[in-house]
Every structure is written in C-alpha cells, then in structure tokens.
Image (tube, grey):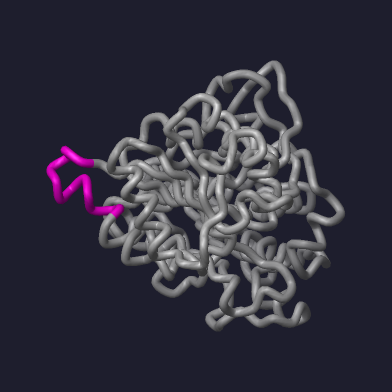
Amino acid sequence: MNVSSKERPSTQTRVLSYAGALLETMDSALADHPNVFIMGQGVDDFKGIFGSTTGLAQKYGAQRVFDVPLMEEGMTGVAIGAALVGDYPITTHIRADFSFLAMNQIVNLASKYRYMFGGIMSCPMLIRLVVGRSWGQGAQHSQSPQATFAHYPGLTVVMPSTSQAIVDMYPQIIVRHPGPVVSIEHRLLYNLDFSVSAGTPAKPIPLTSYVAREGRDVTVVATSVMVLEALRAAQYVAEKAGIEVEVIDLNSISHPDWELVIGSIRKTGRLVIADTSWLEYGVAGEVCRQVMMRDPAMLRQAPAMLGMAAAPCPTAKSLEDIYYPSQHETVEAILTQVCGSRHGIELPVERSMTEGYKRFRGPF
C-alpha cells in the first residue's frame, strides 16, 4: 500500500522508516546549520528517542546534542533564550505529557514574542513531542494534546504521518518558519517503513493539509497514525464493497487547508473524522465547526467521529485495546456513512492497531 503515489509522482523511490526520516533530518539540520542544537531527555542515549537521534551526540559533540535535567520549565526557557539570540533549538519530550510542565514557557512566552514585539523579535524553534499507545504507558503517558497547543495563536502544530512528511516539512520548518513549531510524532509510526521520493518530490507535502487518497463516496479527515488507519480501511472497503474513500491528512492541526477539506466534503457529502485524542473540545469538533460555519447543507447526514474513549487511558492491554479506535470501528464508520447501519458487509477481525502493524510494517 503506497500512501502517496497519487499525490507525489516520482520516478524513483526508496524505503525509509519514520525514525530513519527523523534521524536524517536531524543530522542534516546539524550539518547544514551551525546554529542548530538538539536538547532533551534521552537525546544522547543509545536508544536516541526511538532511533531519531541515535549517534548524533557522538558525531556533533555534547555542545550541540545533549541531555537535560528533569526540569522542563527551566530547560524550555533556556531554549527560548537561545532562539531569541539567533540559535535554533530542537527540544524533544519523549512523552508529550512532559511538555505540560513547560506550558508557561511555550504558551505564554514562545508563542507570543513575535506579536508582542511587533515582529522585531521572533522565537524560531522546533518542539518535538511523542504521543501514542503502548501497553503499560497508563494515564499520565498517553495523552495527545494537539488541540491544546493549536488553541493558542502563535504556535504552529503539525502531526506528520509519514516519512515523506518528515523529510519534506522539517527542513522547511528549520530554515523558513519564523516562530515555534510543535511537532507531534506518534509512537506507533517510528518502526514503520514508507516509500519516499528519492529526489525532490514533484508535489512536496506542505505545512498544511493534503489529499492522501482520492475518492468519491466519503471523506475521512484524519490525523497522524489515524491517516494510516483510514488508508487501510479505505483499501478494505474498496475490495469488499467497491466504496472509494477520500482521505485527507489534516497534517497541520493549527493551520489546516480548510478549502481543501470543504471541497472534498462537498464532493462526497459524507464525513468521518479520525483523531488520536479525545473528541470532546478537540480536532474533530473543530472540523465540524468549520463545516457548520461554511456550508452545513453539504452533509447528507451527521458526521462520524473516531477518537479515544472519554476517560484516562487504562494501563492493562486488554482495556487499552478497546480504549483506542480499532480498524473494526474505522471500517464500520465508513460503511455506515455510505451504506447505512444495516450494511451487512463483513468487518475486519483485528481489534487493535498494533495487530495490523505487526503483520505489515511497510513500505506504506
């Protein structure tokens, strides 16, 4: 299953894991820009943030790739100070939940410098957050806070779902973006392999939204790993029922391409939203708000929404498997939108994402 062949035609491709794409872009940033440095808990460890910074401390030295104390507020303040005087910090939080301890720095300072000083001062920096399920993480290490950060003006929030998104977007962010960017990476993606363009893609992934799969019957607007879930479901319903699903990767949670989204919904008349977080006051609600404000009559029926259950994440795997939306539920939502609740079409049997990715890890 090639996620991006329609959107980025290229004569040559290569296979690159999500972690490999991150490592390549981190390495290139350090090599090409002497003002770039990487800081965070575990960045110089032999595991290197799931393989995304492995060996960089040895290659570039401890002054440019270094571990930090358990003091997120203070260390984020150090990064902001460095950004204000011309350096480019890349800060990493091996769990997105740890960034909550630095919310004052990110929300009250980094996001507002450019506005408060009339554009004279800016705070360009990349904040990498890791989200996602894994048996045993529990309630305090499993949250997906994209809607929280996207709520605040001055922050750009992206959720790259493929290796191509990483190699296209991260260099743009580091070289051109004038303000802080929060990039949310899903843990299930790191070990997956993707087909990426071997050269410059004809249509690189932008810092907004894009069509991951073209279709005519129903639109699925998805974020992060749920884009892959939507693509897998689209392939399933195409084979089982001849239904053609259009999948839109929202990609930038703070600056989506709403015209692209609305154009797709207007074409299909049906909508499924698949997010990695809770539905209440989240990305799914914002998509619905945009539809209602622009043209609610384009929907033939109420949209379906997929996200985490409205509770803290359980630690036990048996409970975690039903806490997150499964491929079963994703396919059911699509079929119900197109065919009704009594569609009678066989559903996939897998009950969790990890089951599918253990059997097939790519190239996507």
Q: Can residue 272 be seen in this view?
A: no
- At a point 48% along the width and 40% down the height, the residue shown is 37
Examine the structure image and report whether residue 117 is included in the region drawn in magenta.
yes
- At a point 35% along the width and 57% down the height, the residue shown is 77
Q: Is residue 77 above or below residue 136?
A: above
Q: Is residue 333 above or below residue 224?
A: below
Q: Which quadrant of the rendered structure holds the C terminus? A: top right
| Residue 74 horizontal/vertical position (percent) | 39, 63
Examine the structure image and report whether residue 331 is included in the region drawn in magenta.
no
Q: Which quadrant of the rendered structure holds the N terminus? A: top right
Q: How many labels does the image show?
A: 0
Q: Nearer the viewer, residue 177 or 69?
A: 69
Q: Which of 124 and 17 is in front in this view?
A: 124
Identify the image quadrant of residue 195.
Answer: top right
| Residue 41 horizontal/vertical position (percent) | 57, 58
Q: Give the range drawn in magenta.
A: 110-121
- At a point 64% along the width and 39% down the height, the residue shown is 56
236 sits left or right of 263 in the view: right
- At a point 52% along the width and 41% down the height, the residue shown is 63
| Residue 216 horizontal/vertical position (percent) | 57, 43
Q: In this view, does 178 lie above or below 345?
A: above
- Considering every residue shown, the one lying at the far left of the view is 118
352 sits left or right of 118 in the view: right
Q: Nearer the viewer, residue 52 or 204?
A: 52
Q: Nearer the viewer, residue 11 or 175?
A: 175
Q: Is residue 310 visible?
A: yes
Q: In this view, does 312 lie above or below 196?
A: below
226 sits left or right of 151 in the view: right
- Considering every residue shown, the one lying at the far top of the view is 11
- Considering every residue shown, the one lying at the far right of the view is 359
| Residue 227 horizontal/vertical position (percent) | 61, 51
